[in-house]
Image (cartoon, rainbow, N blue to C red):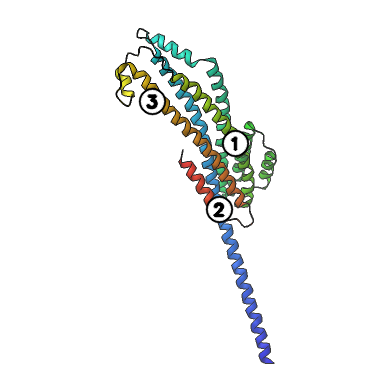
Amino acid sequence: MRKTFLGRQASANALTRLGAVMMLVAFVTACENTSGLRQHGASVAAAGQSVSQVALDATTEITALQDTMANYRAIDVVLKAKADDTDLQIKSAIDKANSDKKFTERKNKLAASLARWGKAYKALAKTYQSFQKLADPAFEADVETAANDFRTAVTGLDAIKKVPDLSGVAKLLVAQLQAGKIREHNNVLLKLAEGYADTWSATGAVLKTEIDMIYSDHIATFHNPVVGQFTDTKKLQAQVSYPVPTHKLAWIYRIEEVRKLEKERDLLKAKLRAVDKAFSALKKAHLELAKEKPSFQVVIESVQTINTFAKSF
């Protein structure tokens, strides 16, 4: 009977030890999950900054494109100039070409849109930067800054396109935001990323259309074979990649420049598509972190995808 009692006691002790081990494993797993959430939450926040920057870079390149086209209009005027045209006459013709009503109205309209978009993407980058710091509980003092940055990003997005519920999320965030609360941060950033991603789809479409219009207008003009009596043949010869007769220099130069423009156009449109894919990868990372048991590998792959697109700019 004593042996039976001792056996039961041993079994009870074993169960107690097993329970303690299981609790320890659960505790360690919970710590690992918390650590993983913190690490990957910070990683996604850094990726959010990259996506914001590539979107901003893409809009900036459209502005540079307009300046490039103004330069090509000037070149076009020079190529059509007569041998006895004075510098003043050529300058006047350039000014007239660049002040064309159709061109200036479109340029001014796009410039206003680009300013709104640029402001919004800068605000989005700043928001992700603030939330990256908040992944560490030690940065509790920066909570209000992050909340303000989030509100600014929402305001910037509203200036482009109104997104339902985001204003409500911003108000709730101010009341509940705490450093180290990665899952809560991720959920509000997910809504922000979704709003910006949806808006970019519309923005990207506008920019692609604008690129096509700019190039179709000016490539057609620049490809015009009618040329004037271009006198600086040595300078023009230096711009042509292979020897040609002097009277064909301007024509060959135009063809080569059109090819360069077409390559630039295709590259810029590819960059717009890359921004769209980067936003999709960012949403995917946020959605994965929102799960009860997220796959950190999926998050890592999404961040890597974003970094790849960022390097293409």
Would you say the residues marked 1 and 2 are in contact, meaning their CB atoms lie under 8 Å apart? no
Give the x, y percent position of residue 74: 43, 17
Residue 249: which quarter of the image? top left
Residue 94: which quarter of the image? top left
Residue 238 in view in this figure = yes
Q: Residues within 10 Å of mark 3 (few under 14, many from 20)?
A: some
Give the x, y percent position of residue 214: 51, 24
Identify the residue under disc 1.
201
Q: Residue 298 carries which label?
A: 2
At horizontal 31% and vertical 20% (from top left) the residue drawn is: 235
User: The disc labelled 1 sits on which kind of residue?
Assistant: Ser
How far apart are the alpha carbons under marks 2 and 3? Answer: 45 Å
Identify the residue under disc 3.
256
On screen, residue 197 above or below 242:
below
The first of marks 2 and 3 along the sequence is: 3
At horizontal 48% and vertical 44% (from top left) the residue drawn is: 308
Residue 52 in view in this figure = no
